């Protein structure tokens, strides 16, 4: 007679798996809505919009957790945040009205825990749906999450335009100025703006203007973007900056064959998101002369001599028509020419096609400070503008740290000062009870130019165990700082965080 033990064991294991609620990272195939995410959004377009039209600071956001069962039925619906009962009823009715494709693990259909975030905005009567991954791994099951604990879980959300395909909408409303058409003007206009916590766009500024009314049209188009839910962290909204690019190009193909030479004021400069893009830097860049010039670097003195260089960056990124002037020696001018000729530059773009651009830069042969460990003694300083010698010396000290009172704009936690308190509550809920009455912990944080904090120290504490916990909590926020500014440049500075009182 065959033993039934293996069969019983297999049955027990399958039964345990059938009851288990899986998370996204445990699955070979996550649950999905039939037709995909776009179909899900289309499905919700037909959901009757709640009659409640109140605008709330948190952006009329609703967060729901639910389980997709083996057969695709939605169960265990739990609302963690809602603007009101009407919104809750609308989402629950819609979620229960459609089956999902079930998740799979180890070749079997399983139950999956999911979270969705809905943004309601009444002027457009539209709903935006977004999936989020909360810190659910801290909980054994969905039922273990108390709705009252949700504010402590919190997750930051980016700002959202509450319309569909806003770029397409604006393109349909764009009016190419007749004067620009007549003059054959083609190019891109950039606009910067600030999205305020109330969802309004302010401080509209032109990054560049190709003229003939194109700048005014770009500003007009930006003002049409009125329906926003602002960026938020936990239940607090905060201001954020944005850049909008508008293309004025009736015939993009003409750019590919055109030999037109643009200036930096006419179109946007090359992309600045890469640190090695020298043409895009606004702050002087200090380069290792030996690395840039090779063994020829020792043929000239580094005496702050200045070379003025004019050249053209062609469509292929090569420099041409190089003209060198200034008060430098012949050898220094020759090395400056070598630097411009041998470097691969990033070509500017017009209508998303490479174009030719006239460039003017200043190159200094500078001797850095010997005690400065993070700069090389023999330096080339590449700058958009002529610099006084005194500024060369001060800028070369890359290890200079400013106090918060010495800068024009101090470093701040990226999601706003209030979020520091919320971060502490999130990761240390009982911190107030562990601090002595009236106790306060001060922690000094070094915020570098890139905003990624890698050093902090205790300035004033209340006790070793509590102080250590405070430092541990703040390390979780090490990548969420905006650096300080001085004279329009990002600088490294000290910032003090207070915990307590």
Image: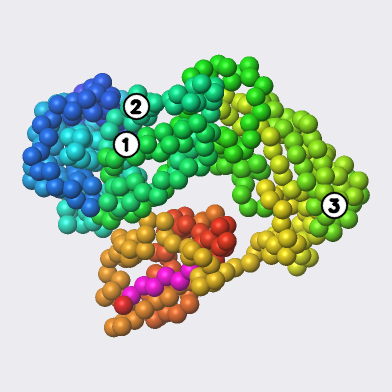
The residue labelled by disc 3 is: 327
Relative to 400, say whether 249 is above or below: above
Confirm whether residue 334 shows in the render.
yes
For image coordinates 56% across by 34% down, the residue present is 267
Q: Earlier in the sequence, mark 1 or mark 3?
A: 1
Relative to 340, say whether 260 is above or below: above
Side (left or right) of 429 relative to 96:
right
Task: State the CA–CA distance, disc 2 to disc 3.
Answer: 52 Å
Which color scheme does this rendered protein use?
Answer: rainbow
Q: Residue 173 bears which disc, if any?
A: 2
Q: Earlier in the sequence, mark 1 or mark 2?
A: 2
Task: State the CA–CA distance, disc 1 to disc 2.
Answer: 9 Å
261 or 478, nearer to the observer:
261
* CB within 8 Å, label 2 to label 3: no
Q: Residue 431 bears which disc, if any?
A: none
416 or 267, nearer to the observer:
267
Q: Earlier in the sequence, mark 2 or mark 3?
A: 2
For image coordinates 45% across by 71% down, the residue present is 496
The residue labelled by disc 1 is: 224
Determine the image quadrant of residue 431: bottom left
38 or 358, nearer to the observer:
358
Determine the image quadrant of residue 475: bottom left
Is-magenta flag for residue 388?
no
Determine whether the residue tagged by mark 2 lies in a helix, strand or loop: helix
* CB within 8 Å, label 1 to label 2: yes
Determine whether the residue tagged by mark 3 lies in a helix, strand or loop: loop
Q: Which span is picked out in magenta?
A: 495-500
Report the label total: 3
């Amino acid at each position: 007679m065959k033993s039934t033990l293996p069969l019983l064991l297999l049955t027990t294991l399958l039964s345990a798996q059938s009851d288990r609620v899986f998370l996204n990272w445990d699955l070979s195939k996550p649950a999905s809505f039939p037709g995909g995410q776009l179909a899900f959004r289309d499905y919700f377009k037909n959901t009757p919009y709640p009659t409640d039209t109140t605008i709330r600071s948190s952006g009329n956001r609703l967060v729901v957790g639910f389980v997709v069962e083996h057969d695709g039925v939605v169960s265990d619906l739990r609302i963690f945040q809602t603007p009101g009962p009407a919104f809750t009823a609308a989402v629950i009715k819609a979620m229960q009205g459609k089956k999902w494709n079930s998740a799979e693990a180890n070749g079997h259909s399983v139950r999956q825990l999911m979270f969705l975030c809905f943004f309601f905005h009444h002027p457009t009567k539209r709903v935006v749906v977004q999936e989020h991954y909360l810190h659910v791994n801290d909980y054994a099951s969905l039922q273990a999450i108390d709705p009252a604990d949700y504010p402590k879980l919190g997750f930051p959300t980016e700002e959202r335009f509450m319309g569909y395909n806003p770029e397409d909408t604006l393109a349909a409303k764009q009016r190419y100025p007749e004067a620009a058409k007549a003059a054959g003007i083609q190019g891109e206009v950039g606009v910067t703006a600030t999205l305020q916590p109330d969802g309004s766009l302010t401080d509209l500024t032109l990054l560049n203007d190709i003229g003939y009314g194109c700048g005014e049209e770009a500003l007009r188009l930006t003002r049409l973007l009125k329906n926003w839910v602002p960026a938020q962290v936990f239940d607090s909204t905060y201001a954020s900056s944005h850049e909008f690019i508008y293309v004025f190009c009736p015939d993009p193909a003409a750019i590919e064959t055109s030999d037109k030479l643009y200036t930096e004021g006419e179109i946007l400069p090359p992309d600045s998101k890469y640190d090695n893009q020298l043409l895009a830097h606004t702050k002087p860049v200090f380069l290792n002369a030996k690395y840039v010039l090779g063994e020829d670097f020792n043929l000239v003195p580094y005496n702050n001599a200045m070379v003025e260089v004019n050249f053209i960056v062609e469509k292929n990124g090569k420099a041409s028509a190089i003209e060198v002037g200034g008060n430098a020696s012949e050898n220094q001018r020759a090395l400056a020419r070598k630097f411009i000729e041998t470097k691969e530059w990033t070509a500017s773009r017009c209508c998303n096609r490479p174009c030719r651009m006239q460039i003017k830069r200043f190159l200094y042969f500078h001797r850095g400070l010997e005690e400065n460990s993070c700069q090389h003694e023999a330096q080339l300083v590449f700058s958009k503008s002529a610099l006084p010698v005194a500024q060369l010396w001060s800028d070369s000290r890359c290890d200079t740290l400013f106090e918060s009172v010495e800068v024009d704009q101090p470093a701040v936690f990226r999601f706003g000062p209030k979020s520091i308190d919320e971060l502490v509550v999130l990761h240390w809920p009982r911190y107030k009870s562990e601090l002595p009455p009236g106790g306060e912990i001060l922690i000094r944080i070094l915020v570098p130019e890139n905003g990624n904090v890698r050093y902090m120290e205790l300035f004033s504490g209340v006790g070793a165990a509590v102080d250590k916990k405070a430092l541990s909590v703040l390390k979780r926020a090490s990548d969420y700082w905006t650096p300080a500014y001085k004279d329009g440049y990002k600088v490294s500075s000290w910032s003090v965080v207070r915990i307590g009182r």
